[in-house]
Every structure is written in structure tokens, then in C-alpha cells.
Image: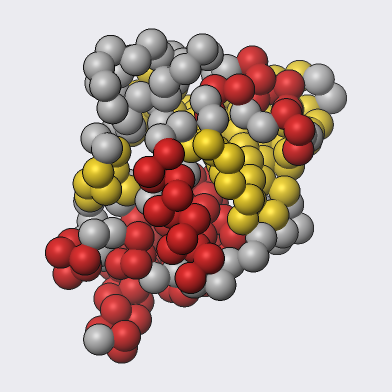
Amino acid sequence: MADDFEEARERMVSNQLIPRGISDPLVLRAMRRVPRERFLPRELWDSAYGDHPLPIGEQQTISQPYIVAQMTESLDLTGEEKVLEIGTGSGYQAAVLADICSEVYTVERITTLSERAKRILQDLGYKNIFFKIHNGTHGWPEHAPFDAILVTAAAPSVPDPYLEQLKDGGRIVIPVGDRFSQNLIRITKSQGEIISEDLGGVRFVSLVGEYGWKEESKQ
């Protein structure tokens, strides 16, 4: 079984990631190593490496592998960074970041998701991931500044706390748009100037909170 998943990860990298332009060796290494199936309900393990998002409960999803790789690569990581992740979700994106970076601080507003992700990541042996259950739109000011910030939910605009908590020279990757479609945006902070780049269209669940969307229904 383990060999089957290892082969599936290799096919994912070869068929989904490299042909679409993912080339950072650190990102490709992480995508080959992190066991995506472990972050899914057991009945979805056979679908773990498909080219699509999957449900993880609480009306949330795990992003398709390519999007995880694209967002990670867009942060231009070298391996020494302290990264803030907004939206722990399944924990898979945090694992990919932690395989590359020095420290990952991940914030999730839904208690059941955060606690489940924490158990999985600790079972897998990750020791450089730190968890917080809170409104993610506030970031994690106690541990700022961050070298990079990755946001796995869509906001109507880039929340001010993220810009404030980003180091000079740092990057934010975040989906920005309405509730139904967004563009993936990379923000670079350079000597106080904010530089924005559009990385293409995406669709994410909504970032809920003071600096995001108001919650319309029980999650």
C-alpha cells in the first residue's frame, strides 16, 4: 500500500506538476514526500492524487495538488523562512511548507479541523508546525514578522494585518475576488512599497472574519 501511494505521488509530480511549469526542486521534493492521503478521510484515499480538490468536512476542501504546488512555489522559498499559513484545513499545505521551511505558523478558525490536522501532523513527525485556533484574518501578530504568508481562503482584498505582519522583502500569496471566483495574487513588500502580481484565476472557499467575508451560514 505504501509503495502504491509513493508511485501515485511520483505520477502526480510527473503528470500534473512538471508539465504545468512547477520546477522549484524544493517544492517538487516536498510534493513527492508528503503523504497526501493521510490528510483525507479513509474512504477518499484512492482519490488522494487526483487532479482535483476533495472535501474534508465542515464545508471545506483540500486543494488540488497543482494549486498547492503553485502557491508554495510562488512564495520563492529557500528553506530558512518563518511562514504564516492562514487556513490550516486538512493540514496538507502546512506539511508541504514545513518540508521546506524552518517554521510554519498555521491558523484555523474551525476547531475540529485544526485539532484533526494537528493530530495527523504530529503522527507524521512534524515538529516545526505551530497551531492556533482563531480568526485567521488577524494573522498571528505575536510571532510576526513573517518571511512569507500563504492564505488558503479567498478574501475580497488583502487584509491589512497580513501586510503589517510581513517582513520587508517578504511575499504573500492569497486568492482575492468575490465568493465565486478569484485571482491568485502575489504581494511583495519592498522597502515599504507593495508590489502586486496576478498569478491567474482560482476558486477557493471564503476567508471569514473581520478582514474577510461575513459568515452567511453555520460552517
Q: Is residue 191 left or right of residue 44?
A: right
**The N terminus: image quadrant:** bottom left
Q: Is residue 49 left or right of residue 143?
A: left
**What residue appears at the point 81 percent right and 20 percent down from the top-left corner?**
192
Q: Residue furthest right?
A: 191
**What residue appears at the point 26 percent right and 65 percent down from the top-left corner?**
49
Q: Which x, y percent locates residue 213? A: 40, 14
Q: Nearer the viewer, residue 182 or 135?
A: 135
Q: Is residue 209 above or below residue 6?
A: above
Q: Which x, y percent locates residue 12? A: 31, 68
Q: Could you tell me if residue 57 is visible in this image?
A: yes
**The C terminus: image quadrant:** top left
Q: How is the image coloured?
A: secondary structure
Give the number of callouts. 0
Q: Is residue 40 above or below residue 147?
A: below
Q: Which x, y percent locates residue 33? A: 47, 74
Q: Nearer the viewer, residue 164 or 20?
A: 164
**What residue appears at the point 30 percent right and 67 percent down from the top-left corner?**
37
Q: Nearer the viewer, residue 169 or 121?
A: 121
**What residue appears at the point 32 percent right and 30 percent down from the top-left corner?**
205
Q: Could you tell me if residue 67 is visible in this image?
A: no
- Which quadrant holds residue 113? top left
Q: Is residue 176 above or below residue 123?
A: above
- Which quadrant holds residue 204? top left
Q: Is residue 92 left or right of residue 202?
A: right
- Which quadrant holds residue 191? top right
Q: Which x, y percent locates residue 154? A: 40, 26
